[in-house]
């Protein structure tokens, strides 16, 4: 990796010594230091740090004394972003158990796989998802604690609160179900907190793009590292206010918008689902200073017809990852609000970042430089030899944030870890390169390259260029079979509202020919109303690729 990137290091030490304590202890410390400070703001309802700690301890007592949860047990958390997610998460840790966060969009069969695979017998779920989990009771699950999001809406608000959040608490009659309110009313006291940095902490599941999702085993040590590293890298202090908009079941939202703020004593303004108008109102009302987002959220914000009325003047830090921020969008953000976008890079397996851009010298569409205590390299995927500056290879990472491995999956573990220079490196499966300054750039997923008559086309590069077209709001590149060239490039785009009906495929192809090498020019453009996205806002290019592959097989 070398040391060339150190000349751009932010004004912080080069190494980080993380606390030798559990993640739960972070809440205990902040509640002791700042007892009356708002920890969570939920549609104008405020939960202080001391109240958050008390709620988590009460639920931890119920988990231990009524549900039989023991040290090292796995407990499922199947909720949208909400006070209950935060309370549930920290209650599980207080009970010395392991959090298994579950994407709330998953259905019964998908949840069942995670429950069975993890061995979780207790699940915390929202009442609007109870029908999905009742079939699992007696088939892995023994107890489900049912939460109503409206239980923590106690203050009046003029904000647009979704109906599923306002829905009143329902009675639950099925065997194995316990209302959250009843669990809290039990007033159970937890036993002594025993977890150490080496105890099991969180097991998020990968997206499962190849086969079933796999559980990523993280101990308190790896979760603690990025909880502390983010605030220190960004020089974030306790009087910041962050807007939490990324899903907490995903590591980026979990760390950047929940665990890091709780460690620092920062106030979390919670928005359960992205809504650009409500987000703008919250930023102004609470003086939000920072938020972590995905580029699609910024695109949506900047395309709002109400943009002129938004007051975002309190924001001083905006960043994220998951996909490269298109240069044209980043420039509009800079021109209109004077805001840069600090990109970072990490995976479920690395509990969020291994790389972040230096705040005072960021580069656009760039992963950044390796974080504290992290050794990252670009290697030949076949030989594992380290490559020179500018050469494209697989990104591998070694550091304290790297997971232990996949839960009960020795085959996958054997494939994803390699030893280089006596260190255990995780193979990310991402293709990247390093520039002369030591910054890392993502080229694409290892298997996403399009081969056009021997020319290699990296979809992420073409997508970035398409975002510079004034009529394009969103774009994704996929491969299409071609009898002459093997594969050809296809673009699926969403046009901005004003351009619909005014811009056609021929115009887009002509523009592409004027702006990129001939072999990169999409042979066809599909104009779509929307693009499929994950719960974290990432465009699901694989879904579109699979649909195209099916059409190619059918001769379409």
Image (tube, helix red, strand yellow):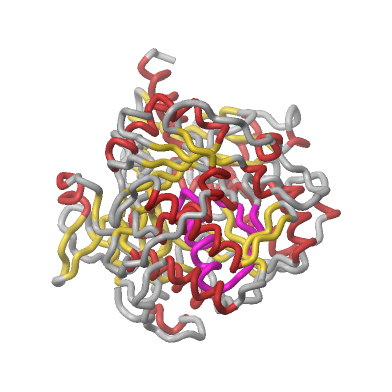
Residue shown at the point (41%, 61%) measured from the top left: 94
Residue shown at the point (73%, 31%) measured from the top left: 500
Residue 259 part of the magenta-drawn span: yes
Residue shown at the point (48%, 85%) measured from the top left: 12
Q: Is residue 140 left or right of residue 32?
A: left
Q: Is residue 202 visible?
A: yes
Q: Is residue 520 visible?
A: no
In terms of depth relative to the viewer, which is nearer, 452 or 252?
Answer: 252
How far across and how far down the image is residue 393, in percent? 29, 57
Q: Look at the image and give the residue range highlighted in magenta.
A: 242-270
The correct choice, above or below, for 509 with respect to 409 in the image is above
Residue found at the far right of this picture: 309
Residue 360 part of the magenta-drawn span: no
How far across and how far down the image is residue 332, in percent? 70, 58
How far across and how far down the image is residue 36, in percent? 66, 72
Residue shown at the point (20%, 56%) measured from the top left: 417
Q: Is residue 77 left or right of residue 236?
A: left
In terms of depth relative to the viewer, which is nearer, 11 or 547?
Answer: 11
Kindly indicate the quadrant of the structure image that contains residue 466.
top right
In terms of depth relative to the viewer, which is nearer, 27 or 551?
Answer: 27
The correct choice, above or below, for 387 with respect to 520 in the image is below
The correct choice, above or below, for 457 with respect to 107 in the image is below
Name the image quarter holding the N terminus: bottom left
In terms of depth relative to the viewer, which is nearer, 342 or 106?
Answer: 106
Kindly indicate the quadrant of the structure image that contains residue 427.
bottom left
Q: How many marks?
A: 0
The correct choice, above or below, for 334 with respect to 92 in the image is below
How far across and how far down the image is residue 537, in percent? 55, 44
Name the image quarter holding the C terminus: top left
């Amino acid at each position: 990796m070398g040391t060339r990137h150190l000349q751009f290091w932010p004004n912080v030490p080069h190494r980080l010594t993380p606390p030798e304590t559990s993640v739960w202890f972070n809440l205990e410390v902040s509640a002791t230091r700042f007892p009356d400070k708002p920890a969570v703001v939920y549609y104008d309802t405020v939960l202080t740090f001391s109240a958050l700690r008390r709620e988590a301890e009460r639920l931890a007592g119920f988990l231990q004394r009524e549900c039989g949860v023991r040290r090292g047990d796995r407990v499922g958390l199947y909720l949208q972003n909400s006070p209950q997610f935060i309370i549930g998460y920290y209650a599980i840790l207080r009970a010395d158990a392991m959090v298994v966060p579950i994407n709330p969009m998953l259905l019964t069969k998908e949840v069942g796989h995670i429950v069975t695979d993890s061995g979780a017998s207790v699940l915390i779920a929202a009442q609007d998802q109870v029908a999905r989990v009742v079939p699992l009771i007696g088939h892995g699950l023994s107890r489900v604690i049912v939460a109503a999001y409206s239980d923590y809406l106690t203050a009046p608000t003029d904000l647009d609160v979704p109906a599923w959040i306002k829905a009143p608490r329902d009675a639950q009659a099925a065997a194995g179900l316990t209302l959250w309110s009843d669990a809290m009313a039990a007033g159970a006291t937890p036993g002594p907190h025993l977890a150490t940095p080496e105890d099991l902490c969180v097991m998020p599941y990968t997206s499962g793009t190849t086969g079933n999702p796999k559980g990523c085993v993280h101990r308190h040590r790896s979760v603690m590292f990025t909880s502390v590293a983010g605030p220190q890298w960004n020089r974030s202090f306790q009087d910041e206010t962050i807007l939490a908009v990324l899903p907490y079941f995903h590591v980026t939202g979990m760390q950047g918008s929940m665990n890091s703020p709780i460690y620092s004593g920062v106030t979390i303004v919670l928005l359960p689902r992205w809504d650009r108008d409500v987000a703008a109102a919250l930023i102004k009302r609470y003086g939000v200073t920072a938020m972590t987002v995905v580029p699609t959220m910024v695109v949506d914000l900047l395309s709002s017809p109400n943009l002129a009325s938004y007051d975002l003047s309190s924001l001083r830090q905006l960043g994220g990852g998951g996909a490269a921020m298109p240069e044209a969008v980043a420039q509009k953000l800079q021109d209109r609000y004077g805001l840069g976008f600090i990109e970072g890079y990490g995976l479920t397996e690395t509990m969020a970042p291994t790389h972040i851009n230096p705040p005072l010298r960021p580069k656009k569409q760039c992963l950044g430089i390796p974080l504290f205590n992290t050794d990252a390299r670009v290697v030949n995927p076949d030989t594992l030899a380290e490559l020179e500056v500018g050469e494209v290879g697989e990104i591998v990472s070694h550091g304290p944030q790297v997971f232990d491995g996949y839960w009960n999956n020795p085959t996958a573990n054997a494939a994803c870890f390699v030893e280089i220079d006596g260190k255990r490196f995780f193979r990310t499966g991402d293709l990247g390169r390093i520039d002369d300054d030591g910054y890392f750039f993502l080229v694409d997923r290892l298997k996403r390259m399009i081969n056009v008559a021997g020319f290699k086309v990296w979809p992420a590069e073409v997508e970035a260029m398409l975002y510079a077209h004034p009529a394009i709001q969103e774009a994704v590149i996929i491969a299409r079979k071609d009898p002459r060239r093997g594969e050809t490039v296809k673009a699926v785009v969403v046009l901005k509202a004003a351009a619909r009906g005014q811009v056609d495929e021929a115009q887009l192809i002509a523009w592409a020919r004027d702006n990129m090498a001939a072999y990169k020019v999409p042979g066809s453009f599909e104009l779509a109303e929307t693009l499929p996205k994950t719960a974290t806002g990432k465009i699901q290019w694989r879904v579109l690729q699979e649909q195209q592959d099916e059409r190619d097989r059918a001769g379409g």
